[in-house]
Amino acid sequence: MVGKQWRRLDPKAKTVWFIKGALFILLMTVILAIILYFGVEFTIINTLLLSVSFAFILLLLVGAWAVMFYERYLFMIQNDGIEIKRGILWKQDISIPYDRVQNVDIERGPIEQLIGTYNLNVFTAGTSSDAQAIFGAEGYIPAVKDADGVRDAILLRVQDSEEDGFGVGKKKTLRIDAKILEEILEELRSIRKKMK
């Protein structure tokens, strides 16, 4: 699970991306057909031919994009952080140290549920909530095989992370057991009674 080996996404990612692209193309094709029929006043045959040709060409492009993007989307769970490589024309190399990780979520949209894939969102301390709302999580990994196992491996590394946010000093995980908390609460109650 953890090491120096790049991992691929689940091959079902290509299917999910193709279906999402096909749904968008279907919507665009209907809009184009309406514009052509009522705006340019083409005949129904010409409107259908142009719309279907447009949709077919875009479906080919989406299929090619899904395959190429899948081949260029890799991630690695290392001892010190998460590495993500992705992109076709605009390539991104993302490095997320464990000491910046705030939360790891597993998400499934309707298409992911239908196909049986999971998306992993790794949220960091350095990303504002506004940026997350627009761009999503800094560490987005779609169609992860064994999403629960990957999330647990990341969270375990986050918990064991020793560096503080500035790369200086050591951070120890504060583990307080319930009995100590109960004793502290009793002591605070007794102090409150004495102050009255």
Image (spheres, helix red, strand yellow):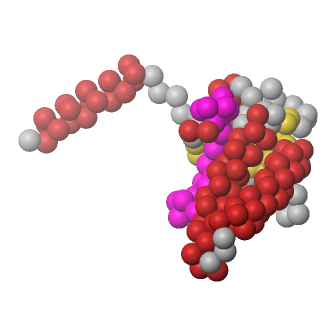
Note whether residue 23 is visible: yes
Residue in the image at 33% along x and 30% along y = 184
* Up/down of 171 relative to 59, above or below: above
- Left or right, residue 103 beside residue 195: right
- Left or right, residue 65 beside residue 38: right
Residue 98: x, y in percent?
70, 43
* Up/down of 144 relative to 54, above or below: above
The front one of 186 and 137 is: 137
Residue 194: x, y in percent?
13, 36
* Up/down of 9 relative to 23, above or below: above
Residue in the image at 61% along x and 32% along y = 114
Q: What range is drawn magenta here? A: 112-140
Residue 111: x, y in percent?
61, 39
Image quarter where the N terminus lies is: top right
- Residue 190 in which image quadrant: top left
Note whether residue 73 is visible: no
Q: Residue furthest bottom?
A: 40
Residue 148: x, y in percent?
65, 26
Image quarter where the C terminus lies is: top left
Q: Residue furthest top?
A: 179
The front one of 28 and 82 is: 28
- Residue 39 in which image quadrant: bottom right
The front one of 96 and 136 is: 136
For the image, the number of numbered tags is 0
The front one of 93 and 79 is: 93
Residue in the image at 74% along x and 46% along y = 18
Q: Residue furthest left?
A: 196
- Residue 189 in which image quadrant: top left
Q: Is residue 131 magenta?
A: yes
